[in-house]
Image: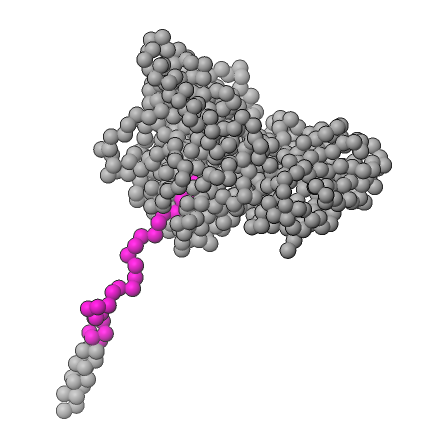
Amino acid sequence: MKNYILHLVFTFCLFLLLACSVNPEDEQPTQSTEKQPPNIILILSDDQGWGDLSVNGNPNLHTPNIDSLAANGIAFDRFYVSPVCSPTRAELLTGRYHTRGGVYSTSAGGERLDLDETTIAQHFQKAGYQTACYGKWHNGMQYPYHPNGRGFDDYYGFASGHWGNYFSPMLERNGEIVQGEGYIIDDLTNKGIEFIQKNKEQPFFLYLPFNTPHAPMQVPDRWWNEMEGKALDSLHRDPSQEDMQFTRAALAMCENIDWNVGRLMQTLEELKLEENTIVLYLSDNGPNSWRWNGDMKGRKGSTDEGGVRSPLIMQWKGTLEPRKKIAEIASVIDLFPTLADLAGVSTEQEKRLDGKSLKPLLLPENESTNWEDRLLISHWSDRTSVRSQQYRLGHEGQLFDMIADPGQRIDVAVAHPEVTERLMEARQAWEVDALAELPTEDTRSFPVGHPDFVYNQIPARDGIAHGNIQRSNRWPNCSFFENWTSVNDSITWDIEVLEDGDFEVEIYYTCKPEDVGTTLALSFQEAIQTFEITEAHDPPLMGMENDRVERPESYVKDFKPLNIGLMHLPQGKGTLTLKATDIPGKEAIDFRLMMLKRVE
């Protein structure tokens, strides 16, 4: 009897267990089978030539981590960017030629991307991605030109075209001035790793515009010690033009970048994100010196092959075919539509894209797709070049067969008149279309006081000096004003206050002890704020102690912030003027920047 009862209990429990394990017919599984959209990591180096990678055949350096991206993914054989920094960045952000976005210079306002342009980050942000940019922005400093106004939730770096110190320099975080932490590329990578770790459970778009190997040529000892004095096996096609120490410094900086790329990839591996993350690596223009670059003609600033050919390496483990090389020509304007296409993000907007999605070239199922020959335009400083799959039309009308003559040594325009005519017509049509969108005069003021942003940085770079005041260097990007010797001297900025309000004003200055007591006045329309320099701050120039070769750009100083009080700025356009009213010594101050912080 006892065994019979135990048998009944066991049978009843088994029935309950089976009943609980079966879903009712109308009940759906709670776990989603939808795959999360791919993450994007977009790494852009600065002034690194196509030849500054060991994967492209340069024996002078080792870039194993970037080489590994190519081994695990796809490399484009002929990929093109603009000849200089800010145009490439504008084209990357918009998928449109930089002339359409108002970019005509690399400084003093000409680097700004028009506010009616929509960026790739804004599209990904709208699609639910977390977005961040860490590095050199170079498409406008004042909000809404600022990265935070162009689709990036988080920004850390500098918005100017180049920087004067790479070791714990003054940077900004979402508009606020902060102090960097260590060597700048290591620091930017740290911020990128933190962003990845924080957003590992949701789709993210991470843009890392590194600022090396752009001058000044500063790199930590770890990489310089291995490169200093090293025998270089491959040189520029005209070795007499090459500065060997500059080359060594540039290559050491590239090896540091590679080390940081390795840290990023290790983070993805540890977080098991490799198969759901698209990683891209490219540069913004040709090399910033004469050095080995695959025998190509031209360097940074040139519309020849050597000035505009860049590496483009893409890894998406498990999706892109390993070690695949794509021969078809492509351009930085293609990245916006390509990444949006791969991620399923809409590119719908009022303005048409110049680029096209490269997805048919990337994915194995699309290998049979017929890819039509196309023409790509390179333009800078009144020079326009046209590239087809086989030919390049030089800016002076020469024609080069890039398959038979990749070094552009033989003009074949006479031998191929029909090709020359076709490319000439394409150049003329582009100039009528895209180049014509660039205004002959820049009438844009520098915006101040946008209601959505607290900080308004107004640097010396964007100012105009009057009287005896001089800029510390002919390249404005990281310069300061000095030689302020008269009360008739002044600095002015053409600004537009977008919404009136009260602003806490800080200036970053230096002043010799004998010049303490200088009084100055800051004015805009009827508003005026006067203040006195009561504390000396006279640090030496710095930067040269970390330079591996002598720099052409300005040296920098440790500028001191001084709060000069509150100032009410009325809405409207006008001239912001900083003027000395009394100079008891020989000079007033050296001026680096002004920060206007909106106070509620």
The image shows residue 381, relative to residue 261, as above or below, that is above
Q: Is residue 599 visible?
A: yes
Q: Quadrant of the N terminus?
A: bottom left
Q: Position of residue 196 (x, y in %)?
A: 45, 50
What residue lies at 48% left-to-right and 33% top-to-bottom? 101
The answer to which of 351 and 66 lies nearer the viewer is 351
The mark total stands at 0
Q: Is residue 416 left or right of residue 94?
A: left
Residue 24 is covered by the magenta coloring: yes
Q: Position of residue 278 (x, y in %)?
A: 37, 43
The answer to which of 338 and 3 lies nearer the viewer is 338
What residue lies at 70% left-to-right and 41% top-to-bottom? 525
Q: Is residue 280 left or right of residue 519?
A: left
Q: Main secondary structure of the magenta part?
A: loop
What residue lies at 69% left-to-right and 49% top-to-bottom? 568
Q: Quadrant of the C terminus?
A: bottom right
What residue lies at 36% left-to-right and 24% top-to-bottom? 375
Q: Position of residue 301 (x, y in %)?
A: 51, 23
The magenta stretch is 17-43
The answer to which of 390 and 529 lies nearer the viewer is 529
Q: Quadrant of residue 164?
A: top right
Residue 534 is covered by the magenta coloring: no
The image shows residue 233, relative to residue 254, as above or below, that is above
The image shows residue 354, relative to residue 35, as above or below, that is above
The answer to which of 415 and 547 lies nearer the viewer is 415
